[in-house]
Amino acid sequence: MKKLEGRSAIVTGSSRGIGKAIALRFAADGAKVCVNCVSTVDKAQAVADEIRKAGGEAIVVQADVAKRAEAEKLIAETAKAFGKVDILVSNAGIVIDRAFVDSTDEDWTRAIESNLHGFFNVSRAVLPHMIERKHGRLIATGSCITEIADFGGNKYSVCTASKGGITAMMRPIAAEVARHGVTVNAVSPGYIATEMLGEIDAAGLEAALTLVPMRRYGKPEEIAAAMAFLASDDAAYITGQVIRVNGGMSMGG
């Protein structure tokens, strides 16, 4: 039996990159998957089609999780399609690479709304459903930027606030829902080879790679593998934790 057989999952921001890899991995492990996007519906549909061609079940729900009503719609439509929501991965987010003194009000608002508020909205929407069913897995995509201050040129102060808020808030939430059979964890990626790397300064990327003991970028599938573990029954006694998947970056170079 596949480890996620009979489960249903939502992966926010899953039309590309890490989110796409998570959606495909969950489906390969037997889960029914809701592929979510804000605007790239064609790409999200392509992910869902790939899942169906492999024999899985998938739907696409367009929703901006930074908005409460749309986050609630995402949960409701998935529950209607699959009968329940067992797993939710809060993955949607953005990267802003800008010196703190040059950061704008718009930078701050975008980071907090897309990253931290998005996690807040989907968590608030899905947890009552999971608590009622006495089972659930809530998993967030964190980031190595919350632990490493100097990346050799890249500057993530504003984004760090939003990602750090997620991992800080995750632990007391995990404590609140633990007795209800719900676990809350995060996977913290290092530099992963996705389209998002193209949004980061090239010289900074090269400098950052020297901080990775493995001297390579991670693969989206390696993040998906950690997510799949946390979503499975094998991780039933793990909650309030951050799994670091970064090639040893957080140990030092």
Image: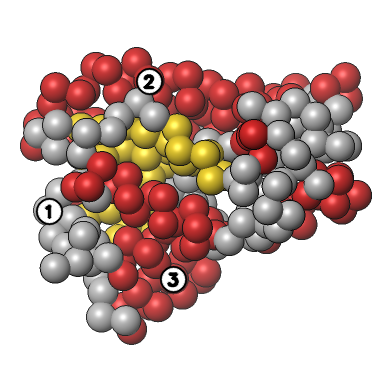
Q: Label 2, secondary structure: give it.
A: helix
Mark 2 Cα-neighbour bin, 10 Å: few <14, some 14–19, many ≥20 = some
Total numbered labels placed on residues in the image: 3
Horizontal side of residue 138 vs 145, given as left or right: left
Question: Who's the residue at 71% across and 58% down the image?
Answer: 216
Q: Is residue 241 visible?
A: yes
Question: Label 1 vs label 3: CA separation?
Answer: 21 Å
- Please name whichever residue, 93 or 74, is drawn nearer the observer in this view of the structure: 93
Amino acid type of the residue tagged 2 in the rendering: Arg
Horizontal side of residue 63 vs 184, given as left or right: right
Question: Label 2 vs label 1: CA separation?
Answer: 28 Å
Q: Does 148 sit above or below residue 80?
A: above
Q: Which residue is mark 1?
A: 83
Q: Position of residue 152 (x, y in %)?
A: 86, 37
Q: Label 1, secondary structure: give it.
A: loop
Horizontal side of residue 112 vs 171, given as left or right: right
Image quarter where the N terminus lies is bottom left
Marked residue nearer the N-terminal end (2 or 1): 1
Question: Label 3 vs label 2: CA separation?
Answer: 31 Å
Q: Does 151 sit above or below residue 217?
A: above
Q: Which mark is residue 47?
A: 3
Q: Which residue is mark 2?
A: 171
Q: How is the image coloured?
A: secondary structure
Horizontal side of residue 30 vs 253, given as left or right: left
- Please name whichever residue, 92 or 150, is drawn nearer the observer in this view of the structure: 150
Image quarter where the C terminus lies is top right
Mark 1 Cα-neighbour bin, 10 Å: few <14, some 14–19, many ≥20 = few
Q: Position of residue 57 (x, y in %)?
A: 25, 71
Q: Nearer the viewer, mark 3 or mark 2?
A: 2
Question: Who's the residue at 49% across and 26% down the image?
Answer: 166
Image quarter of residue 2: bottom left
Mark 3 Cα-neighbour bin, 10 Å: few <14, some 14–19, many ≥20 = many
